[in-house]
Amino acid sequence: MTDTAVTKPNLFHFTRLPRPTVDRADGIYLWDKTGRRYIDGSSGAVNVNIGHGNRAAIEAMRRQMDRVSFAYTIHFESEPALALARELAARLPEGLDRIYYVSGGSEAVEACLKLARQWAVATGQPERWKIIGRMPSYHGITVGSLGVTGDEVLTPAFTPIGKAMPLVPAPFVHRDRDNLSLEERGLRYADMLEQKIVEEGADSVLAFIMEPIGGAASAALVPPDSYFARIREICDRHGILLIHDEVMTGIGRTGKFLGGDHWNCRPDIVALSKGLSSGYAPLGAVAATEKVVGPVLEMGGFLHGHTYGGNPVATAAALAVLGEIDRLGLIDNATAMGAVLKGELEALTQRFPFVADVRGKGLLLGAELYADPVAKTPLPREWNANVRLIDLAFERGLIIYSRRVRGGPESDNFMVCPPLIVTAEQIGEIVAVLADTLQALAGELGLPVNS
């Protein structure tokens, strides 16, 4: 056996970057095997909404395991799966009361796309198959979800085995240089959807998928209010379905149960995951209207399924998560602490002028790094500034979130999205480490700092 064979790890991930081995976690903190502590300023992958080590979730899972840990949905319903469906239907916008379970966010989006397509077939519209997405955007890592994702890094390798769908620009209104108001810009970006529908042929377009508030691809991008009503009107007029990807924005993260609730914008289909089970078990869900689900069931059923969809332990965990969100008032806390954190991030832009465009809602917040924040000139690509920022923060015991998207408007962005249990004192701790990180980044790259 060679030395290489001895030292080469068996486990591999999407990155070759070595990472410490995690040992335990509690609240907003994690510790590695050496005892070093890390602040979870990203809620894992923006999913650990109720924090780590929540005893209610852990005990709910243990109780369910004592009864039954797995029952295949072809054979049995389970009490927690039924109860969770009722809870979700009660919290979602009126009419979104048909629930389907999967195991994660990419699966949830994939199921949304397939449900929409089967609805078209079931309603005598087989010519409708195009699902329009946005550039940039992120909707998952399966072949189908990548097809509606706007990302020129993630998608090209898989285009030969999938089908790339049409894309329209995401509403980066803060970068535009014109004489329009924000609301007028919002309408302009929404009207780009109609232009694309006409260009593609309205009878061929099945749906439009969007994140109400941007996630990884656009760092908590918030469209103008005018955008939402116009999008809904365009979809209705052309008879196409509106799909909201609420995988990251849902379950209280933005200060509402769904991100779209800030605008009373009701989609036809919603993808949920991440905060739904808060990282305690793999779980995702699709919520849809009877208008969509009814014809599909009448045709013989949804041609889709996952072994672990609706797993009793996972749905028991999610029920406990919803209970903790209510008991601890976490949606209100997301609003209150989000305002505190956003104010602190905006204050950092005065000290570090290369940081700008702080945005988001609740505890889904992001900002961008610029060479010139007024002209919106990006930093040189080869600097990989956002990657270096993440690494410098990690070295200092702070975990934040970032992913550069080279498609669409190029940028280096980062997100700060702590668990919804975060306190004002802990936000102070997060911001202090972030400030030290930005100071170090400025020193390495020669970026300006105000005293």
Image (spheres, rainbow, N blue to C red):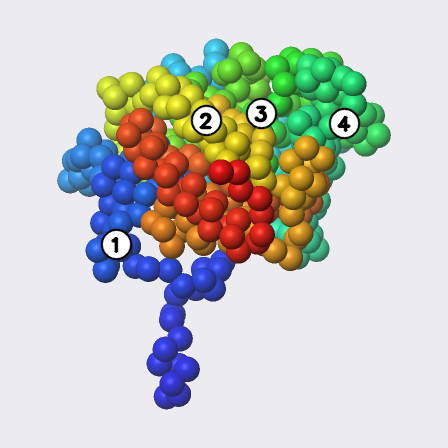
How far across and how far down the image is residue 231, in percent?
67, 18
**Contact? badges 2 and 3 (CB < 8 Å):** no
Q: CA distance from mark 1 to mark 4?
A: 46 Å
Q: Which corner quadrant of the image does residue 99 belong to?
A: top left
**Contact? badges 2 and 4 (CB < 8 Å):** no
Q: Which corner quadrant of the image does residue 324 belong to?
A: top left
Q: CA distance from mark 4 to mark 3?
A: 18 Å
Q: CA distance from mark 2 to mark 3?
A: 14 Å
Name the N-terminal-most of marks 1 and 2: 1
Circle 3 residue: 222
Q: Which corner quadrant of the image does residue 146 belong to?
A: top right
SS state under label 4:
loop
Name the N-terminal-most of marks 1 and 3: 1
How far across and how far down the image is residue 295, in percent?
58, 22
Relative to the observer, which residue lies in front, 45 or 129? 45
**Contact? badges 1 and 4 (CB < 8 Å):** no
Relative to the observer, which residue lies in front, 131 or 369? 369
Label 1: few (<14), some (14–19) or many (≥20) C-alpha neighbours in 10 Å: few
**Contact? badges 1 and 2 (CB < 8 Å):** no
Name the N-terminal-most of marks 2 and 3: 3
Lateral position of residue 108 relative to residue 37, left or right: right
Circle 4 residue: 177
Circle 1 residue: 36
Lateral position of residue 391 relative to residue 241, left or right: left
Q: Residue at x 68, y 33 (%)?
A: 374
Circle 2 residue: 342
Name the N-terminal-most of marks 4 and 3: 4
- Identify the image quadrant of the N terminus: bottom left
Depth check, mark 2 against mark 3: the one in front is: 2
Question: In this view of the protein, can residue 140 be seen by the observer?
Answer: no
Q: Residue at x 30, y 33 (%)?
A: 426
